[in-house]
Image (cartoon, grey):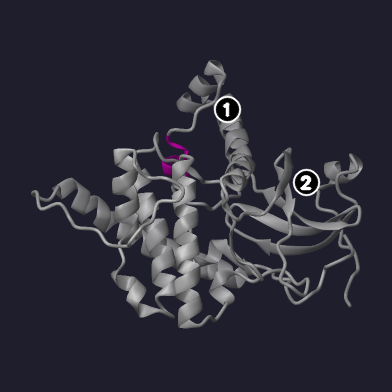
């Protein structure tokens, strides 16, 4: 088995110096906002997600995702709003801490996400999700499933989205590329752009995009899912304050018969256009990433 340690990346070196990481085994992938490495911490194999500097990130429309994010320090908050050098630095820190905060919050809410172990100067240490043989778990996009399994896993994912919304969060970039599949089912990953459902004006259409991305993917295996309207059903209950973590959803929704809101229609058209561009970008990035899933990194825990 190929198991030669690679050169330690500059951003991970401080974690090695502090004894948090003992060895960097390989680069797992490189994406639009971060690079992920397989690392050894003592006897345990984990992931180290290294966030890219803002000048290197290609993540589009970050401002739309940051809307509504606040910090406790009013000076920092004002600087972030003004976009000063200090404010941009603080915005980066908020962006980097958003994922670890979301991971802790969602795990407590019963959503399956990688277990976080802390964020250190822009490097997030977290659980390496593996399959039952110890290989890196595949993304949902790389898995072929039966119609019955598709319906079951889709229901699980809708339950996770509901639980996320009940704690005030929307993934914001959920798709088959941001879900891993291990022996117990789907695991949601990549949350630095998590949206505050109550404070972000884009929350509803981001939720709709997330839910419909997942619906459309599973519908490749179970076409009957295309007729479901879980996003509209969730949001209607959420706005009424009636959405609960264990709410029993039907996937059915009756549209309001009142006159259509032209602005909303235009926004939906623009959102659909933007989503198609995002999907093409994700597909391109998926083929560019470095994937070491063929290597078995499992070691005795």
Q: As drawn, is 288 to the left or to the right of 225?
A: right
Question: Please, is residue 242 above or below residue 176 in the view?
Answer: above
- Residue 145, can we see it? yes
Q: As drawn, is 67 to the left or to the right of 30?
A: left
Where is residue 119 drawn, in percent x and y?
72, 40
Residue that appears at 43% across and 36% down = 67
Q: As drawn, is 24 to the left or to the right of 29?
A: right
Which quadrant is the N terminus positioned in? bottom right
For the stretch drawn in magenta, the main secondary structure is: helix
Instruction: Classify mark 2: helix, strand or loop.
Output: loop
Where is residue 118 drawn, in percent x and y?
73, 41
Residue that appears at 50% across and 55% down = 160
Magenta stretch encompasses residue 77 = no
Q: Quadrant of residue 215?
A: bottom left
- Residue 226's label in the rendered image is none
Which quadrant is the C terminus positioned in? bottom right
User: According to the image, label 2 marks what residue?
Assistant: 11
**Tally of numbered tags:** 2
Q: Which residue is situated farthest in the top direction here?
A: 75
User: According to the image, label 1 marks what residue?
Assistant: 85
Q: Quadrant of residue 210?
A: bottom left
**Mark 1 residue crowding within 10 angstroms, few (<14) / some (14–19) / many (20+):** few
Where is residue 281 drawn, in percent x and y?
48, 64
Q: As drawn, is 212 to the left or to the right of 41?
A: left
Residue that appears at 28% across and 47% down = 236
Instruction: Classify mark 1: helix, strand or loop.
Output: helix
Residue that appears at 41% across and 64% down = 213
Where is residue 34 drawn, in percent x and y?
64, 53
Query: Along the polypeptide, which appears first: circle 1 or circle 2?
Result: 2
Tell me the magenta residue range. 62-67
- Residue 173, can we see it? no
């Amino acid at each position: 088995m190929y198991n030669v340690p690679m050169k330690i990346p500059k951003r991970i070196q401080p974690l090695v110096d502090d004894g948090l990481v003992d060895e960097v085994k390989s680069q797992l992938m490189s994406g639009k906002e971060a690079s992920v490495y397989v690392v050894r911490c003592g006897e345990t194999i984990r992931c180290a997600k290294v966030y890219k500097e803002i000048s290197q990130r290609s993540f589009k429309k970050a401002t739309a995702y940051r809307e509504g994010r606040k910090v406790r320090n009013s000076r920092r908050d004002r600087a972030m709003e003004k976009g000063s050098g200090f404010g941009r630095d603080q915005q980066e820190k908020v962006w980097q801490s958003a994922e670890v905060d979301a991971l802790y919050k969602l795990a407590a809410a019963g959503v399956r996400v990688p277990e976080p172990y802390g964020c250190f100067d822009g490097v997030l240490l977290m659980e390496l999700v593996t399959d039952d043989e110890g290989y890196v778990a595949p993304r949902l996009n790389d898995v072929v499933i039966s119609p019955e399994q598709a319906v079951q896993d889709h229901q699980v994912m809708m339950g996770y989205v509901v639980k996320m919304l009940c704690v005030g969060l929307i993934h914001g970039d959920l798709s088959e590329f941001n879900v891993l599949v291990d022996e117990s089912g789907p695991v949601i990953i990549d949350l630095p752009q998590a949206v505050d459902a109550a404070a972000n004006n884009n929350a509803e259409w981001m939720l709709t995009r997330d839910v419909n991305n997942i619906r459309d993917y599973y519908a490749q295996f179970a076409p009957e899912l295309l007729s479901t309207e879980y996003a509209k059903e969730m949001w209607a209950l959420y706005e009424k304050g009636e959405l609960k973590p264990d709410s029993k959803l039907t996937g059915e929704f009756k549209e309001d018969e009142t006159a259509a809101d032209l602005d909303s229609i235009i926004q939906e058209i623009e959102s659909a256009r933007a989503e198609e561009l995002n999907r093409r970008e994700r597909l391109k990035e998926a083929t560019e990433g470095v994937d070491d899933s063929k290597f078995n990194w499992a070691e005795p825990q």
